[in-house]
Amino acid sequence: MHLELRQLRYFVVVAEECNITRAAVRLHIAQPPLSRQIQALEERLGVQLFERGSRPLRLTEAGRFFQSHALQLLAQAAELESMTRRVGKIERKLSLGFVGSTLYGLLPEVIRRFRAENPAVELTLHEMATVEQIAALKDGRIDVGFGRVRHEDPHVRRIVLREERLVAALPAEHPRLASNGPLSLKELATGTLIVFPKAPRPSFADQVLAAFRDRGLTPESIFEAGELQIALGLVAAGEGAAIVPVGLNPLRRDDVGYRELDDPQLVSPIIFSMRAQDESEDIRALRRLIYRLYREKGIPHFPERE
Ligand code: BEZ
């Protein structure tokens, strides 16, 4: 039998109390098993720790030596316990920044599955624009960002996970919804285009505006909405049309309809960003989970990179 921490605790209390009965009370155990543990300890060490027959109990010289080292070992064990908990807590925190529209893609499931598979990781969520994510990654407020705007920063690694097709959101009563076939940006340019978010820029709004510009088109008028839900509310109110990622389709409202666009190049990327040198195991686990979900659900995506 090896020396056990439990025996050290028993011994230290008996030595402090100089009395088995009082020590047993303090340790919440019966007296006979406590006496047996002290005897077993003496047998294992092959020395007397207490002087035979002494009342109150007196430590032998070996007993005093053992007592001082047992106290140190117990203190170290307590420190080891609390330090490990602290280190574990510090290292196993993952702060995740996301743009609102990713909530209509795979993000909710990614979060649920990550929490279920990594219960020791404390996951916190922060809604923020892609440009804000870059600053937040660099100053340590977040560890991972999910955004839509391509960015260049030497300290941030950008991984494009997949691209979502864009669709047009129109008021439910709009005559174009009744007609067949995909819509063109040219047709959409003839009315008011509602883009979002208004700030901070560049944002998804600029991706949409660039798509028109790249095709030599200028929307008749542009309305900048603060965020996605406002844009869809304004579409419902008949103020114009918006262009949104196809993932938003499950968010159907009765008063908004969606139409495909005629150009397969009209896509919005979902971008995973992290600090360039961050090799955390938790981040790796998150990335592996995302690709696993893509494979499980048959969602087209870019190849997984190390
Ligand atoms: C996605 O919809 O592909 C996605 C969104 C957020 C995080 C990971 C994946």
Image: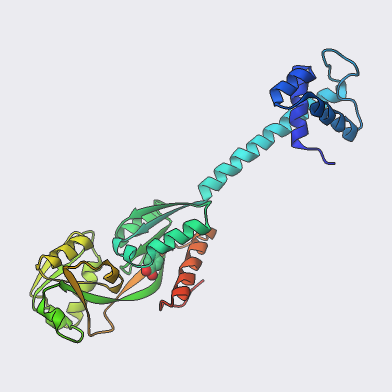
Q: Give the total number of marks visible in the rendering.
A: 0
By what rule are the colours in the image chosen? rainbow
- Left or right of 47, for residue 31: left
Identity of the residue drawn at 32% across and 69% down:
150
Q: Nearer the viewer, residue 238 or 134?
A: 238
- Left or right of 293, for residue 187: left
Identity of the residue drawn at 13% across and 80% down:
176
- Left or right of 229, for residue 119: right
Identity of the residue drawn at 17% across and 70% down:
256
Q: Is residue 95 above or below residue 152?
A: above
Report x, y in % for residue 265: 28, 82
Report x, y in % for residue 151: 33, 67
Report x, y in % for residue 68: 77, 26
Report x, y in % for residue 41: 85, 32
Q: Nearer the viewer, residue 31 or 220?
A: 31
Q: Which of 150 and 77 is in front in this view?
A: 77
Question: From this viewpoint, is residue 136 visible?
Answer: yes
Q: Based on the displayed image, in which of its 4 quarters is residue 222 positioned?
A: bottom left
- Left or right of 85, for residue 11: right
Q: Nearer the viewer, residue 219 or 247?
A: 247
Identity of the residue drawn at 11% across and 76% down:
174
The N terminus - image quarter: top right
Ligand 1, what quadrant? bottom left
Q: Based on the displayed image, in which of its 4 quarters is residue 102 positioned?
A: bottom left
Residue lying furthest top: 55
Question: From this viewpoint, is residue 68 visible?
Answer: no
